[in-house]
Image (cartoon, rainbow, N blue to C red):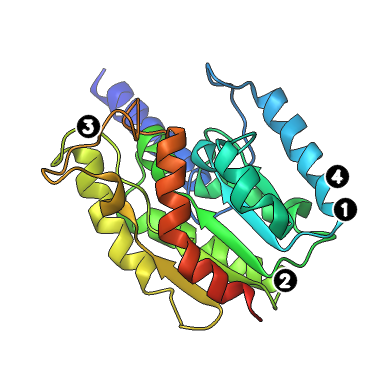
Amino acid sequence: MRSLLASLSLLLAAFTVSVSAQEKAWEPKPRVRSFPWMSYEDWNLMHDAMLRRALQGDVDVLFLGDSITQGWADNAVWKQRYVPRKPANFGIGGDTTQNVLWRIENGALIGIDPKVVVLLIGTNNLGIHDDSPDDVAKGVGAIVRSIHRRSPGTKVLLLAVFPRDEQPGTKFRKAIAAINPQIAKLDDGKTVRFLDIGEKFLSADGTLPKDVMPDALHLSEKGYAIWADAMEPLLAEMLRR
């Protein structure tokens, strides 16, 4: 029995290492399972639609990320601020750094050479994968490098991971506080600019107001207006190239 348990323990350890290896935050991986908000079939359909959009070209500003980015769609702030700037929205709900990296390496930039990519990613690595802050930062760095390999003239406006959870001091808040200083180091003053607007969403006591993030994760229209206002000076500067 002791020998059998030892063998099972070794098998479990090997399986855990294998799964962990498959889930590295800095390695590309497509969506392989469904979530309540989106099946993996729908994820693939969205990726295909984005490939078709990319092949049409004429994109100056590409928004890339997860559901927070996806939420710009049909938003009044989007129509007012970004439609005149030839934008495209490549946000997909539930995406992690692995998913975004896979999408870039599987055609998302073919046909376009954006002046600026607005990148916001990482919160789902914490909520879905339980990746460590160090690994999330590595994943973000891999995405930035992948963008530049495929579109060397594109600048990246890298946003700090937005705050989540209504109250400060939670596990997610602490992890985000550990990620952002690491990805801030990607800012080279030229091809990558880092911008942390997290405090713009918070009340003075550090809580997240419901009229900004109703579920303490996703933005309301007011939240998107805050994002747009806070990002505008740097985005306008980066678009002048």
Evaluate if marks 4 and 1 touch, with contact meaning CB atoms under 8 Å apart. yes
Residue depicted at 47% across the width and 69% down the height: 233
The correct choice, above or below, for 225 with respect to 26 in the image is: above
Left of 143 or right of it: where is 53?
right
Q: Which residue is mark 2?
A: 151
Circle 3 is placed at which residue position?
166
* Residue furthest out toward the front: 80
Q: Residue 160: image x %, image y %?
A: 38, 57
Cα separation, mark 2 vs mark 1, equals 14 Å
Q: Is residue 141 visible to us here?
A: no
Query: Dot 2 lies on which element?
Result: loop
| Mark 1 crowdedness (10 Å alpha carbons): few <14, some 14-19, many ≥20 | some
Q: Earlier in the sequence, mark 2 or mark 1?
A: 1
Q: Which residue is mark 1?
A: 55
Disc with the residue nearer the chain's start (2 vs 3): 2
Q: Which residue is under mark 4?
A: 52
Label 2 close to label 3 by CB (< 8 Å): no
* Mark whose residue sits in front, 3 or 1: 3
Depth order, front residue of 129/67: 67
Q: Amino acid at mark 3?
A: Glu
Q: Which residue appears at 46% of the width and 43% of the height?
A: 224
Q: Amino acid at mark 1?
A: Leu
Picture coordinates of residue 168 (x, y %)?
15, 40
